[in-house]
Image (cartoon, coloured by chain):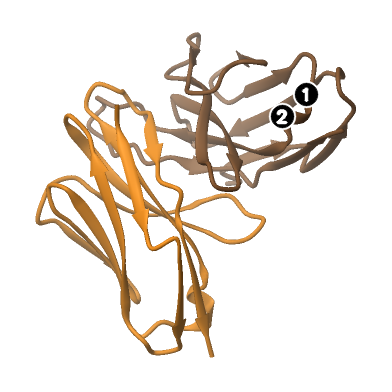
Amino acid sequence: EDQVTQSPEALRLQEGESSSLNCSYTVSGLRGLFWYRQDPGKGPEFLFTLYSAGEEKEKERLKATLTKKESFLHITAPKPEDSATYLCAVGEETSGSRLTFGEGTQLTVNP
Amino acid sequence: NAGVTQTPKFQVLKTGQSMTLQCAQDMNHNSMYWYRQDPGMGLRLIYYSASEGTTDKGEVPNGYNVSRLNKREFSLRLESAAPSQTSVYFCASSRRVGTGSSYEQYFGPGTRLTVT
């Protein structure tokens, strides 16, 4: 059974204080790892897809990396508008286009 | 280009009442999904439709039915609502795996359902 575990559950940062969120996964064959951002009262918003170990993707202050067991979402010099819940999901080779989601990390960036 | 739209945005039902949640996408995606999101449980797949004409159960299908009306529309029906179905419901769509394209899912804004 696919498993996705995100840590920490919640993270408070000061503006400008860089940090990383973790997504550990267990799948028999990884088809893709996905990061989403979710604001309160909204649907998840797609950020990145990573397909193989060693791959990296960047968007503004966010950088996602992937190993064979986990993915990190690095946030460099965050701003208050980066406050949101960040969700990680995995696609497994025998599951078609279905994804298994982690429970998310709630990030708060204080000014 | 509206992406994924859902109606209604909010709904309050009494136990035993029925209702249908509507979802439509304008991205020409083959696959569509219904999830529920509860505190501490994350997003859980209720039903999905890999392509027009097919539907399959997800992780938590009991108490729900779905209809893939056409390529654009995928509805979720609660025949006899229960308080345990109080949740936020999200519809999503994606390209189909195997087409050579990426298959990230795009989500609608959600329906907040309360069953009393």
Numbered disc 2: what chain? B
Left or right for A81, reference A22: right
Query: Label 1 crowding class (10 Å Cα cut-off): few <14, some 14-19, many 20+?
Result: some
Residue nearer the viewer, A40 or B68? A40
The quadrant in which the C terminus of chain B is found is: top right
Q: Residue at x 58, y 61 (%)?
A: A39
Measured in 3D between alpha carbons, the distance from the residue under mark 2 to the one under mark 1, in whole angstroms, is 5 Å
As drawn, the label of residue B84 is: 2
**Looking at the picture, does residue A67 appear above or below residue B111?**
below
Left or right for B85, reference A54: right
**Tags 2 and 1 touching, CB below 8 Å:** yes
Q: Which chain is painted in brown?
A: B
Q: Are marks 2 and 1 on the same chain?
A: yes
The colour one sees for chain A in the rendered image is orange
Q: Secondary structure at mark 1?
A: loop
**Looking at the picture, does residue B84 appear above or below residue A16?**
above
Image spot of residue B105 (x, y percent): 43, 40
Residue nearer the viewer, B55 or A25? A25
Image spot of residue B47 (x, y percent): 53, 21
Q: Residue furthest right?
A: B14
Q: Residue at x 74, y 19 (%)?
A: B78
Query: Label 2 crowding class (10 Å Cα cut-off): few <14, some 14-19, many 20+?
Result: few
Numbered disc 1: what chain? B
As drawn, the label of residue B82 is: 1
Q: Residue furthest top?
A: B53
Amino acid at the residue labelled 1: Ala
